[in-house]
Amino acid sequence: MIAARLLQRIEANWEAIAQAVISSRNQDPSLPTYRNLSDQEIRDRVRDLTTNLGRWLYTKDDASIAHHYEQLGRIRYAQAVPLHEVIQKLISIKRAIRTYASEQNYNLSPVDIYDELELLRAMAGYFDFVIFRVAKGYEGAMRSSADSGSSRLPDFQSAKAQSA
């Protein structure tokens, strides 16, 4: 298995990772809409992503995980969170997990280092998959909204005007 002990530490320490994400959110001017989400929502998302990382690595259950993250994209669209912020936040979570994993690499053997690199490579694939599925769900919700005659575009424009 790919760095099973490290993956278990990531899953067990999701709260520390979430706190790092919350701190970075509060300091990142490119995420104004995410400041409106509660800390608990961010914690839930980090826990969800770390739990599903292990599940995806071990089962390759693409269908249910794809559905899960497409639903997240639809939710973020309904919350009027701009897609670029959703993607930036996912990248921020990935970076926090990678930083945590790298900080755990003291006294590693060459085999452990190789396992860590394999985990980081696999994690990159997982986040690529998640980002694609979130964007797909978001865009699907946007198309459905446009087809039904209610567009979120004015909300984005007013949010942009307010942040300028």
Image: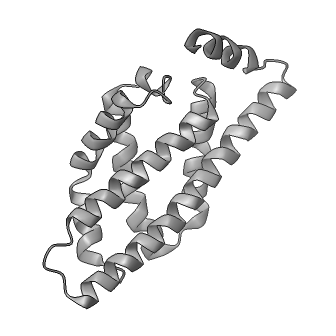
Identify the residue shown where x is 23% and y is 46%: 15
Quadrant, the C terminus: top right
Identify the residue shown where x is 83% and y is 26%: 146
Q: Is residue 77 above or below residue 9?
A: above
| Residue 37 image-quadrant placement | top left
Number of numbered labels in the structure image: 0
Image-based side of 4 in relation to 37, left or right: left
**Front one among 137 and 19:** 19
Image-based side of 137 in relation to 79, left or right: right
Percent of width and height locating residue 95: 39, 53
Q: How is the image coloured?
A: one colour
**Front one among 116 and 59:** 116
Percent of width and height locating residue 74: 63, 36
Q: Is residue 69 above or below residue 37?
A: below
| Residue 129 image-quadrant placement | bottom right
| Residue 3 image-quadrant placement | bottom left
Identify the residue shown where x is 46% and y is 73%: 121
**Front one among 129 and 100:** 100
Image-based side of 88 in relation to 28, left or right: right
Percent of width and height locating residue 140: 75, 40
**Front one among 163 and 130:** 163
Quadrant, the N terminus: bottom left
Percent of width and height locating residue 8: 25, 68
